[in-house]
Amino acid sequence: MSTRTMRAIRLHEHGGPDVLRQDEIPVPRLGPGEVLVRVHAVGVNPPDWYLRDGLSNIPPETRPTFDLPVTPGTDVSGVVEAVAADVEGFAVGDQVFGLLRFPSFDGRAYAEYVAAPASDLAHKPAGVDHVHAAGAPMALLTAWQFLIELGHDHPSPFQAERHRPVPLDAGTTVLVNGAAGGVGHLALQLAKWRGAHVIAVASGAHESFLRELGADEFIDYTKSRPEERVHDVDLVLDTVGGRESSRFLRTLKRGGVLFPVFFGAYDDEETARLGVTVSGTQVRSSGAQLAEVGRLLDAGTVRVAIDSTFPLADARAAHERAAEGHLQGKIVLTVA
């Protein structure tokens, strides 16, 4: 009996974008609870290049283990090709999207087919094409779980306390740092959906884009420092992180909170003196939450911006684009 094969982008070693290699490998077999998806598009996310680099930027105690060769990718949109006998709610021909197996780094989405846990999938919104659907899962679930509803009881590897979103309404001021990026531009829209006053921080090239998405105020960080321009903010969502993230503590009112999406360094004495809180979490796959935010996508309440698209075979070029930075929305791989 012949084995069906497919194209997949795999890592046989760690390094730069040049280590991404196209291979011909067997189409995956379904396990219990899984759905075989014929992939139409794949979202490109920071964990993809973390995996490519060998996860060197993740603390060893929280670093998942994996063997080479490995297929990167977690965000997928496509059509159901087959369904395991124990799966309900999905049928052959359904259009679906999802964030697969995160935070395990075992999504295996850079391929023509992927075996996906049914619990990680949702039906793709009818009014959203595969490219925009593939750009949504990780970034939109990150924004949702930070800002709206955590939706799980898994402890965070980054803090002892459970992350708790802050109620957002017309009386809330939210500052989004890195507002033009994948998580940032979706978080801005979710905060506006809840009625908040939103201050967007990005480079000047993104001002018109962010104002179109609903930003009430805009700060060009290349011309002025946000902590010198803004005070008495209720919530900062920092999608950039790094050593300078702590400067945003000074934009908060007493009782305010800073949510760092990426790692940052914060001084406990400074946060206590300012009377503010720092809290984070780690995004996790959730088909149920994707179904909920999918309704916002379908209604046009939230839209995914696409920075650029590349064919699957050009995954290297997609990673090179990501390394350039200054993205406006998401990078997506298309699968013929």
Image (cartoon, helix red, strand yellow):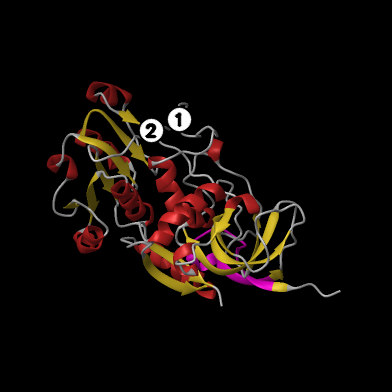
Q: Report the side of 215 relative to 336 (left or right).
A: left
The three-letter code of the residue at mark 2 reads Ser
- Which residue is painted at 57% across and 59% down in the image? 72
- Which residue is painted at 39% across and 43% down in the image? 261
Residue 21 in percent (x, y) is at: 58, 69
Q: Nearer the viewer, residue 56 or 293?
A: 293
Q: Nearer the viewer, residue 290 or 131?
A: 290
Q: Earlier in the sequence, mark 1 or mark 2?
A: 1
Q: Report the side of 320 relative to 314 (left or right).
A: left
Residue 43 in percent (x, y) is at: 48, 62
Q: Locate the C terminus by quadrant.
A: bottom right
Residue 177 in percent (x, y) is at: 28, 48
Whole-angstrom CA distance, mark 1 to mark 2, is 8 Å
What residue does disc 2 label?
A: 279
What residue does disc 1 label?
A: 159
Mark 2: give few (<14), some (14-19) or many (20+) Cα within 10 Å.
Answer: some
Q: Residue furthest bottom?
A: 336
Question: Could you say whether the residue bearing mark 1 is in a helix, strand or loop?
Answer: loop
Q: Locate the N terminus by quadrant.
A: bottom right
Q: Which residues are magenta?
A: 6-24
Q: Nearer the viewer, residue 211 or 69?
A: 211
Q: Nearer the viewer, residue 114 or 225?
A: 114
Judge whether residue 297 is colored magenta: no
Label drawn at residue 244 = none
Query: Is residue 250 among what the camera can see?
Result: yes
Q: Residue furthest right?
A: 1
Q: Do the residues under discs 1 and 2 have CB atoms within 8 angstroms?
A: yes
Residue 167 in percent (x, y) is at: 33, 35
